[in-house]
Image (cartoon, rainbow, N blue to C red):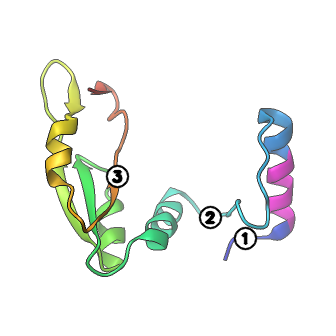
Amino acid sequence: MPGLPSLRKIISRKILTQYKAEYNFETEITITAGATQALYTAISTIIHSGDEVIIIEPAYDSYVPAVIANGGVPIYSQLTAGERIQFRLEVIKKKISRKTKAIIINSPHNPKGSVS
């Protein structure tokens, strides 16, 4: 249920006018009731039974329930704490398997986050 077509069309025009980016309101714009619904919808389109999703923690509390509700398996990766809070690609790479379908990155892990 992507939302009211007239609203999606108005949003498409606004994006074109303001950002010079063109999106098809019929296929590329969806109206949601907020971030939690938007995240659930995005996760439910790609995650199915047995799919693994790497989630970098700490993370927004809606990620894990959305993954589990769609039959996915959350795989946790902790941030590295130090002078800067960051995740390390070499740690994440070790968690990737043939079942991995997504990596959810809560970036930049406000307020001291970084990517290395």
Q: Is residue 109 left or right of residue 21?
A: left
Residue 103, position as x, y percentages in the image: 32, 53
Mark 3 residue type: Ile
Residue for point 51% across, 56% down = 35
Main SS of residues in magenta = helix
Magenta span: 6-13
Q: Quadrant of residue 25?
A: bottom right
Residue ID for mark 3: 104
Mark 2 residue type: Thr
Residue ID for mark 1: 3
**In which quadrant will I find the C terminus?**
top left
Residue 70, position as x, y percentages in the image: 36, 78
Q: Secondary structure at mark 2?
A: loop
Q: Mark 2 and mark 1: span between their CA atoms?
A: 7 Å
Residue ID for mark 2: 32
Q: Mark 3 and mark 2: span between their CA atoms?
A: 20 Å
Q: Earlier in the sequence, mark 3 or mark 1?
A: 1
Asked if residue 10 is among those painted magenta in the image, a careful observer would answer yes
Residue for point 73% across, 66% down = 27
Q: Quadrant of residue 44?
A: bottom left
